[in-house]
Image (tube, rainbow, N blue to C red):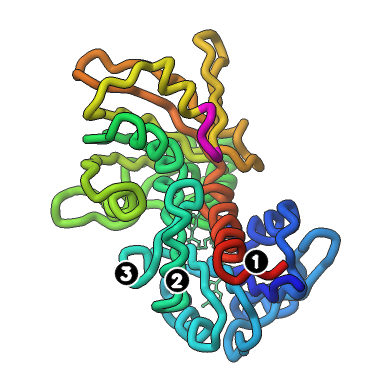
Amino acid sequence: MGYKVVVAGATGNVGREMLNILAERQFPVDELVPLASRRSLGTEVSFGDQTLKTRDIEGFDFTGYDIALFAIGSDATKKYAPIAAKQGCVVIDNSSLYRYDPDVPLVVPEVNPEAVDGYAKKNIIANPNCSTAQMVVALKPLHDRAKIKRVVVSTYQSVSGSGKAAIDELWDQTKGMYVPGQEVEPKVYPKQIAFNVIPHIDVFLDDGSTKEEWKMVAETKKIVDPKIKLTATCVRVPVFVGHAEAINIEFEDFLDEDEARDILREAPGIMVVDKREDGGYITPVECVGDFATFISRIRQDSTIENGLNLWCVSDNLRKGAALNAVQIAETLGNRVLKKG
Ligand SMILES: NC(=O)c1ccc[n+]([C@@H]2O[C@H](COP(=O)([O-])OP(=O)(O)OC[C@H]3O[C@@H](n4cnc5c(N)ncnc54)[C@H](OP(=O)(O)O)[C@@H]3O)[C@@H](O)[C@H]2O)c1
């Protein structure tokens, strides 16, 4: 007997990837219902070799469904997640709404799978922000060996992290640059994204940082270790899919770059591609459609006592969202629900 699964936001970037990944990983599904807003009623989506018609989330009865994977943004999640949870369906949510709620586990299965067990307080499990998810997969095995004191991270985040409207904006703006009269004004982003980079993701906070940067700090503390100090600069770049991060780590104990490379090679969810030659590293276009988080450019930082630099690349729609959510469903299944 398998699971009765709902995918809410099935017409979106993350929702479609959820459907792909559930099929690719052969998650034991008995029944799958794709939901979205009324706008998408009847829109066809693919699930393995099936074509399913999207239903309206409004009024949907979650009773009898085991797991609902949500990717519908915070506002709609606020309305529908409590309904699903109350009707006995465990919600695995991709929005930021519940991530910092002490009664909701925030889970990256390679890092803190045991946290899933705390799902029952609200019947909700939160998925981290895309930039956090890939980073903590790399930080955790190094932290276990040499204790991380401080992290300085700069992100290079693709536009698919802002939803389908942002993908269209980059595409149309790029084409429009070459056709006089067809220039496209920024709408999703505050400035032109084509042929540009924007050091601003999510809203500004009082201390001058952005909410995206704050999320990386708060989520790393919740998932890995509250003692880790972290400072981030989050930047949007004109790439469709795949987030990259330059990460500088300061440890309590010395960690040699060769040992770090070996640790990362053995770590779950990671692929090390690190040759010190032209092209001996991974770039975002190469990670698209992959499950792994890729680590390259591992090297000592000789400006501090116990320092290491690395380059971390992953498909933000996968490890940063849909894959992590499906892995949480698998973990919940194996540890708690035990069907399939
Ligand atoms: N993209 C990423 O890298 C990433 C990473 C981590 C987390 N997330 C989170 O995942 C969520 C979805 O992101 P996305 O990139 O997939 O966005 P998207 O491509 O814009 O898709 C949004 C989805 O939500 C649905 N939706 C919007 N408002 C709704 C409502 N009121 N009721 C029901 N369904 C509604 C849309 O349905 P319609 O088609 O009917 O409008 C669509 O299926 C967001 O919370 C985002 O923060 C995204």
Residue 53: name its quadrant: bottom right
Tell me if mark 1 has few (under 14), some (14-19) or many (20+) residues whose alpha carbon lies within 10 angstroms of its own: many
Is any part of residue 326 visible from this angle?
yes
Q: Are marks 2 and 3 in contact (CB under 8 Å)?
A: no
Residue at mark 1: C-beta within 8 A of ligand 1: yes
Q: CA distance from mark 2 to mark 3?
A: 12 Å
Magenta stretch, main secondary structure class: loop
The residue closer to the viewer here, 163 or 48, is: 48
The circle on residue 119 is: 2
Eye-nearest disc, 1 or 2: 2
Reading the image, the residue beneath label 3 is 101
Q: Residue at x 22, y 29 (%)?
A: 252
Name the spot of residue 45 as percent of width and height, x first: 75, 66
Q: Residue at x 25, y 25 (%)?
A: 253
Residue 118: name its quadrant: bottom left
Secondary structure category for the residue under label 3: loop
Name the spot of residue 276 as percent of width and height, x first: 50, 10
Name the spot of residue 320 as percent of width and height, x first: 50, 49
The residue closer to the viewer here, 242 or 4, is: 4
Task: Specify start and end residues of the magenta stretch as a single range.
Answer: 265-269
Q: CA distance from mark 1 to mark 2?
A: 26 Å
Up the image or down, 249 lies above or below 19; here it is: above
The circle on residue 11 is: 1
